[in-house]
Amino acid sequence: MEPLHARYPFLARSREAVEAAAVDLGEIVATDETVTARALERVESAITDGTVGEPHRRTRVELLSYPVARVLVSLVDVHICTRKYAQAEAEAAYDRFTEEFETTTELKSTQRETLDRTELLAEFDLASAVSDAGDGYRVEVGAYLDLAADQRGDSWRLVNRPLADGEVRVTAEELNVLLKQAIRHRVTDGLPFTVPDAIADELTEEVDRLEEVLSELELTREIDTVVPELFPPCMKSLLDQVQKGEHLEHHSRFAIATFLVGIGMTTDEIVDLFQVNPGFGEEATRYQVDHIRGDTSPTEYSTPACSTMQSYGDCVNMDDLCETISHPMGYYEQKLDDTDEEELVDWREDEGDEEADA
């Protein structure tokens, strides 16, 4: 087990190093608290701050914590946890390889084995799909579309890229971003997987800790997209009641308001929605929404978790996805992730278009 393996545990040769050492994962989680603690740190830090924490000083501990972390993610089996973990591992690798690409000469003088771009491209079978263009790189369009699919921003859309002879021009930095995406795909691949009971039993406390962290934190990226057809069933129902002018209990109004704030709607937009409700008062509604947002209170309120929605009777029309998540925002975020960006039509933009046509 070499330091390079620990820095890039997703590499095929890192996996081979673990296999060559004949490591018994069941024995590791049963007897090596240091590895288990580092694995827990990898996942918990991914959830809370988007990192994998500080690497352990011992190569063996750092490397073995990676497969154990994947076991933990599989046992938790929550989409947002899996996504955040894969993103954090990819981000950590990105920080390391971009630094090594830039300081290869200096690093080699220290006799530390490093990873170069050519090796990383070969790792993901991209060597033949990427060629040097002098002032940048050319990427075969198929590989580009695969790796750029989840990138945000119009600049990544194929229609906005230089394209010639089936190849897309990218800068060195953009190629690094595509490589980070390849790493995220590698980390995500196979997650979650079935964990033997003997291993799962040894990790009960760690899984409980991660589930506690997940239940306490708002686990969503900053969302500014309003697509009602992708709302979780509970929020679809509450929104429908609002639009029909039906009376909502306080807890129901709070739930839908916090959800709408959480997905990026402004106070004015939410006030407009509630105007049809019985007993509507603009000043009171505006104050309540600003209070939820944290503008008129010291606290920014989060959308209630599924367990809270259930306790108040607001959890209705559960579907298959509801069975796998623990938070309405997590449901909505997964729906956004699973939908092609070009198919996402923001409700507010649609309403604006209708007004313009009128």
Image (tube, rainbow, N blue to C red):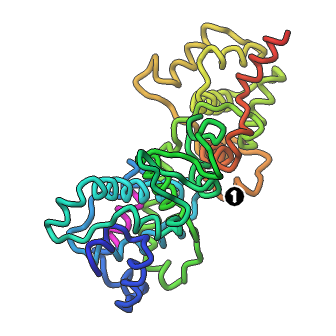
Residue 242 pos. (x, y %): 77, 24
**Image check: 210 left or right of 96?**
right
From where the camera sits, is residue 52 visible?
A: yes
Quarter residue 157 falls in: top right
The location of residue 151, given as percent across then percent down, is: 56, 44
Name the residue carrying label 1: 323
Quadrant of the rendered image containing residue 9: bottom left
Is 323 on the left or on the right of 104, as rendered? Answer: right
Relative to the observer, which residue lies in front, 338 or 256?
A: 338
Where disc 1 sits, the SS reads helix
Q: Residue at x 66, y 17 (%)?
A: 269
* Quadrant containing the N terminus in the rendered view: bottom left
Q: Is residue 68 one of those drawn in magenta? A: no
What residue is rendered at 67% in x and 9% in y? 281
**Which residue is more in the foreground, 17 or 161?**
161
Quadrant of the drawing holding the C terminus? top right
Judging depth in this view, the residue of 208 and 320 nearest the camera is 320
* Other residues around mark 1 within 10 Å, as few (<14) / some (14–19) / many (≥20): few
Report if residue 41 lies within the magenta region: yes
Q: Main secondary structure of the magenta part?
A: helix
Q: Which residues are magenta?
A: 36-44
In the image, residue 233 sits, relative to residue 118, either above or below, namely above
Does residue 211 appear anywhere in the picture?
Answer: no
Question: Which amino acid, by three-letter code, is at mark 1?
Answer: Glu
Number of marks in the image? 1
Q: Name the residue: 58% across, 40% down.
A: 162
- Taking 245 as reference, is 130 above or below it? below
Position in image of residue 26 (x %, y %) = 43, 86
Q: Nearer the viewer, residue 71 or 163?
A: 163
As drawn, is 147 to the left or to the right of 105? Answer: right
Q: Residue at x 28, y 75 (%)?
A: 61
Residue 342's x, y, as percent? 71, 39
